[in-house]
Image (cartoon, rainbow, N blue to C red):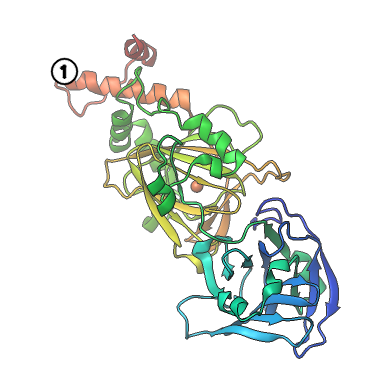
């Protein structure tokens, strides 16, 4: 199983160095990350670790520092001003708050701290470094007015402090984003001629230029109006796929039955069809372009995307998308969800929306077709080839190899052939009788 890598959030590959042991009341070893904030007083820093005891994340400048002290039942924001004893700004106690800014001593977790000098906000969260996963927020504007905390705009480095042994320390992965956590990019992408002032203001959609260059590359390949499922040479393709799913003996129905054999009785609908388009270019987990067919009520397990960038466009029908904090059974509630309709496009990258579940909420007989495009980050030199997923039968995180059920051309040819055979048999009042005819002959008829 793969967990989140060191470069999961943008460019940081820092090392951690022990600086000193705190002489203060609580003895914690301080480990400094060799990375300066690109802009003083603003950044989001995180650490992926399995912390079994209370620890701290610190921003520092000179003799002053701002920190979050994370415990299983108490978490506090604290400051040290000009080397004096540390003082508490704000504390939350388990049971008194609806959020969960506490230590998960039983598992690995990303803990992050954001400092935002423009909006005077300190934010602490867990999981992906996005506003939706903020668990604790503190506005220090009133302290600035009292002449305190002006040094926050000078914060320039960051550290982690705790009682970690050598083995634990080796496994800690620091994360860094040059920007603070503010409004997150929304999941829906629209063309630049569709964006308007209302959408920008409501943050209900974004344009692809706001996302990674990898996402922009993929989007420009599939977002065009002509990239559709039904085409002039086969205008009934979507109807034919629905028929093939619903008809015993037809290719989609047969393949779905084969795929469901290994699934438990409760999860027979946890499968879909993967039709690959083009070759594996060595820059994505499996083929870079995949047509996915989701029969009504079928769904995927909760899964991650090998730290890659992806674009998903709905070609036919509609689909529910649910996003999760991380790939862990303990995090089984989505923190965000959306329904995507035909023509709509969503995205993911190593830092946002990386763990999701897709579900065709429509009734049986109404399939949804999507085009999924994948690309590794240009900073990814590992190229992990699997989509890790939660196996709810075994309660394990398993690896899914992104295989192909068909090549696109083969799939279209087979579905087309059986569709024409069905139409011909219907015309002869032989409804329900499926006659196999020469596929080549039928394909000629379709394209003529
Ligand atoms: Fe996915």
Where, quadrant-wise, is the N terminus in this rendering? bottom right
Where, quadrant-wise, is the C terminus in this rendering? top left
Report the residue that reaches farthest toward the top.
448
Q: Is residue 228 visible?
A: yes
- Left or right: 213 in relation to 222: right
Q: Nearer the viewer, residue 67 or 277?
A: 67
- 392 lies above or below 255: below
Task: Indicate the quadrant where residue 5 lies.
Answer: bottom right
Q: Which residue is mark 1?
A: 428
Residue at figure coordinates x 64%, y 41% from the top left:
376
Q: Nearer the viewer, residue 174 or 296?
A: 174
- Left or right: 104 in relation to 361: right
Tell me residue 341's x, y (percent): 34, 42
- Left or right: 134 in relation to 245: right
Q: What secondary structure is marked by label 1?
A: loop
Q: Residues within 10 Å of mark 1 (few under 14, many from 20)?
A: few
Residue at figure coordinates x 36%, y 26% from the top left:
415
Q: How many marks?
A: 1
Tell me residue 304's x, y (percent): 55, 52
Q: Nearer the viewer, residue 296 or 86?
A: 86
Q: Mark 1 CB in 8 Å range of ligand 1?
A: no
- Left or right: 237 in relation to 403: left
Report the residue that reaches farthest toward the left.
429
Report the residue that reaches farthest toward the bottom.
25
- 440 lies above or below 210: above
Tell me residue 379's x, y (percent): 71, 44
Residue at figure coordinates x 32%, y 32% from the top left:
244
Tell me residue 38's x, y (percent): 73, 56
């Amino acid at each position: 199983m793969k967990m989140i890598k060191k470069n999961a959030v943008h460019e940081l590959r820092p090392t951690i160095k022990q600086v000193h042991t705190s002489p203060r009341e609580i003895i914690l070893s301080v480990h400094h990350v060799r990375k300066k904030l690109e802009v003083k007083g603003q950044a989001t820093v995180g650490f992926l670790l399995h912390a079994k005891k209370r620890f701290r994340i610190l921003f520092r400048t000179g003799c002053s520092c701002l920190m979050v002290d994370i415990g299983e039942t108490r978490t506090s924001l604290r400051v040290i001003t000009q080397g004096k004893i540390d003082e508490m700004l704000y504390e939350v106690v388990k049971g008194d708050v609806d959020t969960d800014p506490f230590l998960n001593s039983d598992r690995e977790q990303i803990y992050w701290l954001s400092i935002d000098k423009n909006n005077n906000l300190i934010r602490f969260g867990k999981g992906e470094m996005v506003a939706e996963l903020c668990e604790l927020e503190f506005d220090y504007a009133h302290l600035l007015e009292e002449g305190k905390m002006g040094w926050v705009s000078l914060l320039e480095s960051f550290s982690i402090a705790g009682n970690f042994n050598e083995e634990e320390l080796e496994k800690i992965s620091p994360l860094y984003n040059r920007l603070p956590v503010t409004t997150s990019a929304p999941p829906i992408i629209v063309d630049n001629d569709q964006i308007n002032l209302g959408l920008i203001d409501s943050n209900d959609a974004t344009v692809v230029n706001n996302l990674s260059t990898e996402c922009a590359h993929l989007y420009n390949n599939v977002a065009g109006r002509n990239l559709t499922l039904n085409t002039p040479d086969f205008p009934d393709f979507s109807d034919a796929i629905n028929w093939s799913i619903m008809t015993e003996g037809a290719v989609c129905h047969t393949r779905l039955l084969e795929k469901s054999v290994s699934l438990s009785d409760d999860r027979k609908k946890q499968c879909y069809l993967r039709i690959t388009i083009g070759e594996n270019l060595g820059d994505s987990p499996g083929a870079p372009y995949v047509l996915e067919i989701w029969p009504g009520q079928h769904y995927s397990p909760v899964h991650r995307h090998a730290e890659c960038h992806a674009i998903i466009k709905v070609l036919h029908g509609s689909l529910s998308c649910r996003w999760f904090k991380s790939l862990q059974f303990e995090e089984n509630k989505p923190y965000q969800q959306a329904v995507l309709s035909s023509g709509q496009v969503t995205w993911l990258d190593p830092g946002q929306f990386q763990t999701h579940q897709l579900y065709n909420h429509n009734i049986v007989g109404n399939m949804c077709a999507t085009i999924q495009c994948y690309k590794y980050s240009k900073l990814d030199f590992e190229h992990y080839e699997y989509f890790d997923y939660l196996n709810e039968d075994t309660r394990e995180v398993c690896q899914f190899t992104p295989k192909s059920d068909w090549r696109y051309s083969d799939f279209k040819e087979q579905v087309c052939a059986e569709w024409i055979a069905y139409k011909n048999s219907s015309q002869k009042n032989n409804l329900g009788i499926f006659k196999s005819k020469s596929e080549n002959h039928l394909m000629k008829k379709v394209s003529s």
